[in-house]
Image: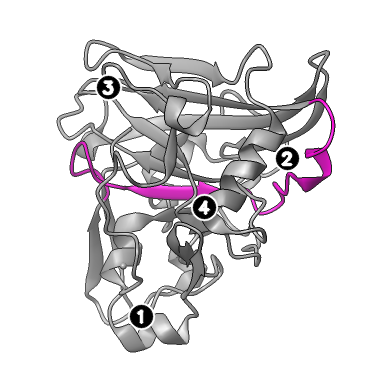
Amino acid sequence: MKCTIKQTVVAAALGVICWSAPAGAVIIMPDPSTPIPGVDSSLYGTLGSTYDDFVAFSAHLNTLLGYPGFDVTTGTGLLAVKVYTGATGASNAAYGFVDPLHAPGGGITSFSGVWGSGNTITVKQVIDFLHSYAGPQVNIPVFMFDMNQINNANHNYGAIDILGNVRVVDAAGAEQAHWSFDMINNSVFDPTAWVTAPGTLVIPKIDGTSYTVDNNIGSGQLDYVAYAPTMDLTQWYNGNYFFQADFRLNGLSDGFEELYLTGMYAPNNPVPEPSTMLLLGAGLFGLAFYNRRRCKL
């Protein structure tokens, strides 16, 4: 997979915390309900956006506003397990996980696949990975996403569409829990409620200026970070339970995307309240009006 908002004072005031873990400093994600400085949050959202069960952040917006730890190069050495990539020969053997889902670079318009299908990833594996790199307090997986659609012909500004559904199943394949990433806040996976991820995000400020964020600068740069605040996996640690991640992409035309399961970040517990369609707009996947016809909240 491809592998901080303006002043240090702002970042400190908004509560970014780092603490030591076995592999080094782990970044605690900002409170997703934090207002973006100088922006009318009732119109253009907060630092994190809600997409059904998930909270999502633009890594580049976090960097612009002064949050440390998000301006990183993706790839080897980031304590991340690859979920999906088009890189040749990509492997998760060093972490003891099944290899990533693979798609060729270029020449495809869509992708779908389930990482962990066939009960190949145990919940215990995931939690042990998180504890090894983020510490024993962290039991919620965080996903890193790298876009590579700079010249995408299917959408303006290199945008793509994405859906996700993470599940815990038992040995017989019966679902024990799930967390959905889509545009309808109903805790049900809606496979037609695509979230549009624009490459360029412009957020108007009250003073007439704006934040301009490039979320799609090509392969090798972290673009988005997302997690489901209720995805605490501890209750399935003991026993025969398995982890599956179903992610789908559409509107592709230029290169391949990359998705990681990371031990680099730990979630912040507060959850932003779902509100209007526009409130979904300023965090991870753009202003809500960018894809108004798909938003039916």
Residue at image location 78% in from the left, 39% down from the top: 237
**Which of marks 1 and 2 precedes in the sequence?**
1
Q: Is mark 4 in CB contact (under 8 Å) with mark 1?
A: no
Whether residue 286 sits left or right of residue 34 in the image: it is left
Sequence-first tag of 3 and 2: 3
- Magenta segment, principal secondary structure? loop
Magenta-span inclusion, residue 238? yes
Marker disc for residue 87: 3
Measured in 3D between alpha carbons, the distance from the residue under mark 2 to the one under mark 1, in whole angstroms, is 32 Å
Question: What span is colored magenta in the figure?
Answer: 215-240
Residue pointed to by mark 4: 133
Gap in angstroms between the C-alphas marked 3 and 2:
33 Å
Q: CA distance from mark 1 to mark 3?
A: 40 Å
Mark 4 residue type:
Tyr
The quadrant in which the C terminus is found is: top right
Question: Label 1, on which residue?
Answer: 38
Q: Residues within 10 Å of mark 1 (few under 14, many from 20)?
A: some
Q: Is residue 55 visible?
A: no
Q: Earlier in the sequence, mark 4 or mark 2?
A: 4
